[in-house]
Image: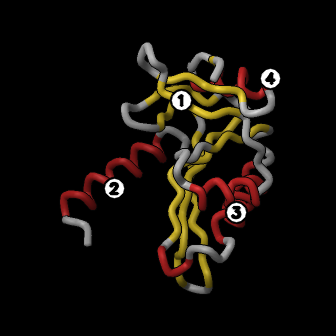
């Protein structure tokens, strides 16, 4: 159970996201909300320590997804991703989504939704983060440009 102050902090974060043109999406099964995610435009961030970046017009960054535990493993996450792509198609031509390297379920859901791996984010020996090409040097460079991170050799 969340503490009351945690709920208010989350509510403030949600309000700030909506004010910056981020759009929340909720997946429902009947009358039950079972998962959520966000489509971000403009200024946003990911990770700890946070990497801040601007999503250019015509792009969207899909972020902060979760499915209720009882509903996981039922294809809801890839379905929610696909629904967002369809809903945002008139405003965006390119979509970006990240997942933690160890989150295999998220990686599978992203792949089932039709996304292709562009790059991996690595901690650099000299500090900071960099992208390592995952099969498409061009897409890795585009991702590095979006995130403001260098593309490096593995």
Q: Are marks 1 and 3 in contact (CB under 8 Å)?
A: no
Task: Find disc 4 in the rendering and name its residue.
Answer: 138
Percent coordinates x, y for residue 99 in the rendering: 57, 47
**Foreground: disc 4 or disc 1:** 1
- Number of other residues with Cα within 10 Å of mark 1, as a class: few under 14, some 14 to 19, many 20 or more: some
Q: Residue at x 54, y 68 (%)?
A: 35
Task: Find disc 3 in the rendering and name its residue.
Answer: 78
Is residue 24 in view from this perspective? no
Q: Quadrant of residue 126?
A: top left
Cα distance in 3D space between marks 3 and 2: 26 Å
Q: Are marks 1 and 2 in contact (CB under 8 Å)?
A: no
Left or right, 22 with reference to 127: right
Cα distance in 3D space between marks 1 and 2: 31 Å
Task: Find disc 2 in the rendering and name its residue.
Answer: 11
Q: Residue at x 67, y 60 (%)?
A: 109
Percent coordinates x, y for residue 50 in the rendering: 40, 32
């Amino acid at each position: 159970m969340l503490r009351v102050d945690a709920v208010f902090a989350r509510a403030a974060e949600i309000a700030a996201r909506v004010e910056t043109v981020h759009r929340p999406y909720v997946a429902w099964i009947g009358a039950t909300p079972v998962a959520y995610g966000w489509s971000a435009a403009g200024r946003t961030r990911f990770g700890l320590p946070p990497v801040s970046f601007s999503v250019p017009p015509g792009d969207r960054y899909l972020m902060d997804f979760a499915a209720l535990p009882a509903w996981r493993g039922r294809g809801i996450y890839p379905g929610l991703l696909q629904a967002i792509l369809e809903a945002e198609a008139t405003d965006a031509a390119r979509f970006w989504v990240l997942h933690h390297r160890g989150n295999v379920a998220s990686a599978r859901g992203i792949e089932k939704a039709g996304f292709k791996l562009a790059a991996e984010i690595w901690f650099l020996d000299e500090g900071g983060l960099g992208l390592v090409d995952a099969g498409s040097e061009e897409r890795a460079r585009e991702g590095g440009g979006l995130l403001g991170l260098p593309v490096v050799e593995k």
